[in-house]
Image (spheres, coloured by chain):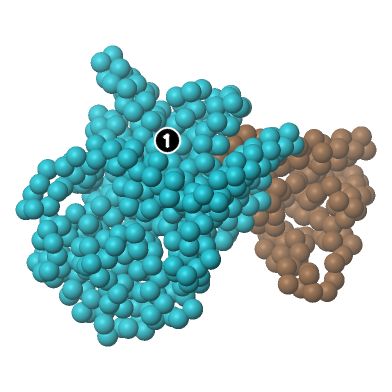
Chain colours: A brown, B cyan
Amino acid sequence: MSSVMMVGVDGSDCSARAVKYVLAHAKPAGAKVLVTHVIEWSRYSFSTAAENEQRHKRREEEITRANEDIVDPVVSRLKEQGVDAAGLVRHGHVSDTMRSLAKEHKVSSIVVGRQGSAGLKSYVFGSVGARLVQVAECPVTVVP
Amino acid sequence: MSKLRVGITTLIGLLCSFSAFAETGMDEKINLAVKPYADAVAGAVFSSFTVGGVAIPFVLVWLIIAATIFTFYFKFINLRGLKHGFELVRGDYHDPKAAGEVTHFQALATALSGTVGLGNIAGVAVAVSLGGPGATFWMILAGFLGMSSKFTECTLGVKYRNVYPDGSVSGGPMYYLTKGLAERGPVLAKLGKVLAVMFAIFAIGGSFGGGNMFQANQSFAQVVNVTGGDASWLADKGWLFGLVVAVLVGAVILGGIKSIARVTSKIVPFMAVTYVTAGLIIIFMNFSAVPSAFVAIFDGAFTASGISGGVIGVLFQGFKRAAFSNEAGVGSAAIAHSAVQTSRPVTEGFVALYEPFIDTIVVCTITALVIIITGTWDPSVDPSAGVQLTSTAFGSAISWFPWVLTLAVVLFAFSTMISWSYYGLKSWTFLFGENKATDAVYKILFLFFIVVGSSMQLGSVIDFSDAMIFAMAFPNLLGCYFLLPVVKKELNEYWADLKAGRLVKTRDA
């Protein structure tokens, strides 16, 4: 049974590094790769009635855009290299959603890129990688 | 971008035309022009019968009786449903695959931003002054009963909403009156159409009155009050205040500048929490006065010593304030709640129970307690001094609070206006069709009424505002009566599923 690796992508340089890492490791291991993008969203946010009316439509647009711009290019690139890859887009809190998706898809390890911001900003706000390491139920690799 | 250009051009046009009149005592002119119409409409809606020397409007009786009947019909869902409603709002039953859609919390927050407004602050002061502390008891009771009306109308709002091919969602009494009654037979179908049109017309009036002019008027009054009262530079410049607010509101509704609405929607809950906290602090600071306040409330509710109109008068003030503040039975909340993502309409009914609870039983009661405890209620109050009274009450305990209150008042007014502009727009497009032109016409009219509202004397504004909002309750509740069995069926099926554990409870970390 092949293992499943999850890689978190957001179109940035640091997630490109994560993809590179996954490419290097998934292929020899024959692992399947779940290319995941989480659209930052909270269920406790505040909105106007006009926004709510359009929310369903905008959600679809956000998902389509995420697929087209961020996830699909990575999936095709992985497939070209002979890796069994699939894309996954979900709304929610980034690290919590990745954790629950990993559980749902029985992922054996998660790979994310490191933002590389040291100092006050990351100290105060933390980072996806740091939080994921704390909450995930499988090994997490943070690629520098 | 061109929409923005249209918006800015229109607003500049408004600005120019109004400043042309600036020199000529605009406030007084507007007031004189509009007053006769406002009074005529208010008179019609509030036609009343006299009991014990007090004129009771039919429409108020209509609201309270409906709320009472609904409470019994659904076997005190306003008590039974609270726990589950809380769980739904918290997201316990949230489907992970539906992440990104409108949640129960968001629908409730949106609806609350529309109902929590000047009525909670200014209106309560008037009610407690005219009706004495006893009005608080009847206000809480009306809030409690009103929860059942909200439950009913919001369930129907979700059940009969329109989902369009592009994914947008529109719901509200206009839709459940037409679609819902159509299911009950051809005669009722015709009635449904008539009621829907009536509702839409009154809702448009309500959106210009209580949702607009009243908010503009009272927030202006508080700004004047805190900047020196009659001696304030702003004292006779209501039109100017109205213009500034109109530009801001216009930027959101015409210009689509979401950033303003987004900022407001973050600040408003914060202000609400601040207001409630300040109220609680004052109450705890005067803890020894609390028991006597409650004695005054119960005593006043049933003996009404010194209040003109006796117990009926007290009851009337309390009920009236609750009805205007939480809009239960009016149908506006159904429009806001209808966008929620759910496959079981009655879930939104459970969630909607919290609206009158938070609006009336929490916020209004806190306002009332502060006014009673600080002893600032005054039976000889001029109803136009509503917000001033609350300001004095809070100010007597926390000296700088009137400034915070002004900010809260302006923000509450702003968010209520944004919400009601939506409700009115939905009603307008229901009548005149959905297209850019009708859209723009309504919105420009809405902005116009902001300026009018801050220029008029409160007396006529308050009567007209009350009238239109209460008028909405007539078609709305009539339709609800016919649709009660539909709601009951939804409720019973859902409740059975809930008890049998068939509903998936997800509580992700």
Q: Counting other residues with Cα less than 10 Å from the Cα at mark 1, is it few (<14), some (14-19), or many (20 or more)? A: many
Instruction: Looking at this view, name the residue that lies furthest to the left.
Output: B52
The residue lying toward the viewer, choosing from B100 and B275, is B275
Q: Is residue B495 left or right of residue A30?
A: left
Residue nearer the viewer, B21 or B330: B21
Q: Quadrant of the N terminus of chain B?
A: top right
Percent x, y for residue B199? 35, 31
Closest to the observer: A85 or B427?
Answer: B427
At x 85%, y 71%, the residue is A118
Q: Quadrant of the C terminus of chain B?
A: bottom right
- Quadrant hosting residue B391: bottom left
Q: Amino acid at mark 1?
A: Ile
Q: As rendered, which of B268 and B454 lies closer to the eye?
A: B454
Q: Determine whether, in the image, residue B409 is placed left or right of residue A57.
A: left
Rendered view: B7 above or below B356: above
Q: Position of residue B65 (x, y in %)?
A: 18, 43
Check the image and name the residue furthest to the top.
Answer: B186
Residue at x 67% of width, y 63% of height = A135
Quarter of the image holding residue B158?
top left
Furthest residue in direction front, as rendered: B24
Please give the chain letter of the residue carrying mark 1. B
- Which residue does the numbered mark 1 point to in the structure image? B204
Residue drawn at x 35%, y 43% as measured from the top left: B35
